[in-house]
């Protein structure tokens, strides 16, 4: 049995990058908030909204160019940004709800509750953004991974253009060499 760890490492690399970008967003948010409140004397609620949106923009650009760079070309930039912004606003609602529940009902310390709330929102943000905002690359691999390599090898016919035909129908897929195949003696397991 051959075990490949590359998909695991790339998955955790993306999560790590997403987390680092999120931490940079906290720094951007804090700097902008402080500048607006102390430097320009803008009221805290309004300054917080501006700082949050600037941090969302910063996080989007970093995630689009670094964390999800391989998937970024599938949709127009504006569409990806609108999706990311919507997901971030959902994350903001999750943070507020969890923070409220933990401080008012569980009587947790504000800062501890905030860490838990931000953690919950981070999970939401990562899962939804990786599956919706930058989902182009994962849809094609999902199509390939749903196929049984043995059934595919036995029932599919390839033509020179790379269109694979089977009893289910035909679709554009990568050439057979790019798919996981099982031989009679070896088994490849992607984790």
Image (spheres, rainbow, N blue to C red):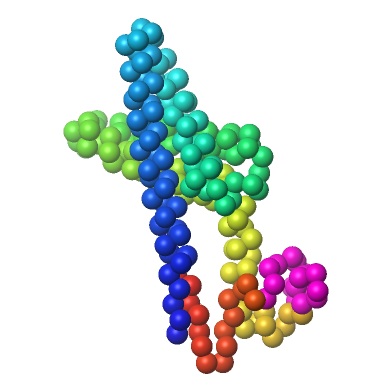
Q: Is residue 52 above or below residue 114?
A: above
Q: Is residue 30 above or below residue 190?
A: above
Instruction: Classify the position of the N terminus by image quarter.
Output: bottom left
Furthest-right residue in view?
Answer: 160
Q: Is residue 43 visible?
A: no
Residue in the image at 62% along x and 73% along y: 179
**Which residues fall within the magenta stretch?**
158-176
Whether residue 110 appears in magenta in the rendering, the answer is: no
Q: Which of 41 and 123 is in front in this view?
A: 41
Q: Nearer the viewer, residue 132 or 158?
A: 158
Residue 123 located left or right of residue 76: left
In which quadrant of the rendered view does residue 165 lie? bottom right
Task: Give the percent coordinates (x, y) of residue 60.
Answer: 51, 36
In which quadrant of the rendered view does residue 25 lie? top left
Residue in the image at 39% along x and 28% along y: 28
Furthest-bottom residue in view?
Answer: 185
Q: Is residue 154 visible?
A: yes
Task: Give the percent coordinates (x, y) of residue 107.
Answer: 19, 34
Residue in the image at 38% along x and 26% along y: 29
Q: Is residue 141 above or below residue 184?
A: above
Task: Give the percent coordinates (x, y) of residue 124.
Answer: 43, 44
Residue 145 located left or right of residue 28: right
Instruction: Classify the position of the C terminus by image quarter.
Output: bottom left
Task: Give the percent coordinates (x, y) of residue 116.
Answer: 28, 41
Q: Nearer the viewer, residue 109 or 36?
A: 36
Q: Which of 169 and 68 is in front in this view?
A: 68
């Amino acid at each position: 049995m051959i075990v490949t760890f590359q998909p695991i490492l790339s998955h955790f690399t993306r999560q790590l990058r997403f987390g680092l970008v999120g931490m940079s967003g906290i720094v951007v948010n804090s700097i902008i908030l402080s500048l607006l409140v102390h430097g320009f004397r803008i009221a805290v609620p309004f300054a917080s909204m501006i700082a949050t949106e600037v941090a969302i923009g910063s996080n989007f650009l970093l995630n689009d160019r670094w964390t999800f760079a391989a998937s970024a070309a599938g949709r127009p930039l504006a569409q990806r940004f609108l999706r990311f912004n919507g997901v971030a606003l959902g994350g903001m609602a999750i943070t507020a709800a969890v923070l409220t529940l933990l401080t008012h009902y569980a009587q947790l310390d504000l800062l501890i509750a905030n860490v838990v709330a931000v953690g919950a929102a981070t999970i939401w943000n990562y899962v939804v953004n990786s599956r919706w905002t930058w989902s182009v690359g994962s849809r094609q691999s999902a199509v390939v991974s749903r196929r049984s390599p043995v059934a595919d090898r036995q029932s599919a016919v390839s033509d020179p253009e790379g269109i694979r035909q089977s009893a289910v129908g035909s679709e554009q897929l990568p050439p057979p060499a790019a798919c996981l195949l099982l031989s009679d003696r070896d088994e490849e397991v992607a984790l």
